[in-house]
Amino acid sequence: MTKFIVRRLLLMIPTLLGVAVLIFLLLRIVPGDVVEARYVGGQGQFVSVEQMAMERAKLGLDQPLWKQFVAWMGGLVRLDLGISMWTGAPITEEIKLRFALSLQLAVMATIVATVLAIPLGIVAALKQDTWIDYGVRVFSIAGLAMPSFWLGIVFILGLLIIFEWLPPMVYTPFWVDPWQNMLQLVWPALAVGYRYSAVATRMTRSAMLEVLREDYIRTARAKGLWTKLILARHALKNAILPVLTVIALEFAFLLGGLVVTEQVFNLNGLGLLFVEAIARRDYTLTQALVMLVATVFIVVNFTVDLLYAWLDPRIRFR
């Protein structure tokens, strides 16, 4: 087990290096840079070519690509994300508050999805082809069909029309005012978590149906074990593995993939920051955000692999 953990940790290094090389080159392939986005997109007729060349020199864009890449990687090794080319502020400060917002929203949506998906998936599998099963299927298909941002708009309109109350539209950190924070984030968490739960519910149902047909489940039933005991000790532990993978990957996606939902609830999270950084051709900020999300994906996958051995003792890492 120790060798497996060490090997996986070491494999993270070439994976992150590959992501770094890829995002660095892709950003340079796209026409234009932050200087053109700032001046040519605005008052370009008042800016000379010499002035633009001076601005590029200040940002280090006149250096060869390999020098720019080495300088950036040197900063990453020192855990220094650098300075935003657009605002001139440290990238760590740009990301810190928005990462806290997106992380909290992702955690809350994951909790909502898990609380909905696992019980509903189990019940649908146990009551296969009954009205309960059909109801759960309709519930999950509706979640897949409705975009989370549209559901968020419905929530806001419903609260406004029925209760004449509008959720807070100015973000308040949890450590400043927990009540105001929850009043604002619970609604996007419900909207995102419902759609998130639809995928996990269908996965839970399919996995449970497959496990419940296994010989060891029939043997446990023949021995007269309680249904709750069979589900908890035998069926669920084996069926939960693919569900855990889906939940973990969706959690990692939520950190940077909720651009429109964040706009609906006026949340300035990582998704919106991603869009702004790309639109402004802010190389350093975009690179930092991509590396952050890639690191989250890798760490989440690593954690899930470790949980596999704990949930299913038959799995052994050698």
Image: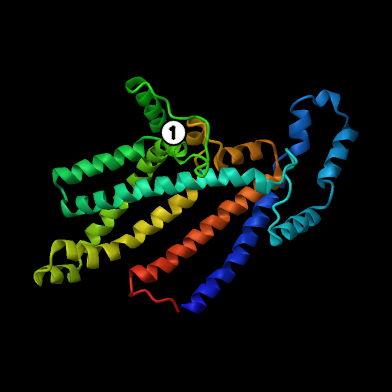
Is residue 35 left or right of 155 when viewed as pictured?
A: right
Q: Is residue 213 visible?
A: no
Instruction: Give the position of the C terminus as an image quadrant.
Output: bottom left
Residue lying furthest front: 176
Colour pattern of the rendering: rainbow
Q: How many marks?
A: 1
* Residue hosting label 1: 149
Q: Nearer the viewer, residue 279 or 175?
A: 175
Q: Residue at x 59, y 53 (%)?
A: 292
Q: Is residue 35 visible?
A: yes
Considering only vertical position in the picture, is 288 above or below 165? below
Secondary structure, mark 1, is: helix
Q: Quadrant of residue 309?
A: bottom left
Is residue 127 left or right of 38 when viewed as pictured?
A: left
Residue 46: horizontal and vertical position, in percent? Answer: 85, 24
Residue 255: horizontal and vertical position, in percent? Answer: 51, 47
Considering only vertical position in the picture, is 318 above or below 134? below
Q: Residue at x 56, y 69 (%)?
A: 9
Q: Quadrant of residue 57?
A: top right
Residue lying furthest right: 50
How many C-alpha atoms fall within 10 Å of the one at disc 1: few (<14), some, or many (≥20)?
many
Considering only vertical position in the picture, is 233 above or below 317? above
Residue 189: horizontal and vertical position, in percent? Answer: 41, 40
Is residue 206 left or right of 283 when viewed as pictured?
A: left
Q: Nearer the viewer, residue 268 or 74?
A: 268
Residue 22: horizontal and vertical position, in percent? Answer: 65, 54
- The residue under label 1 is which amino acid type? Phe
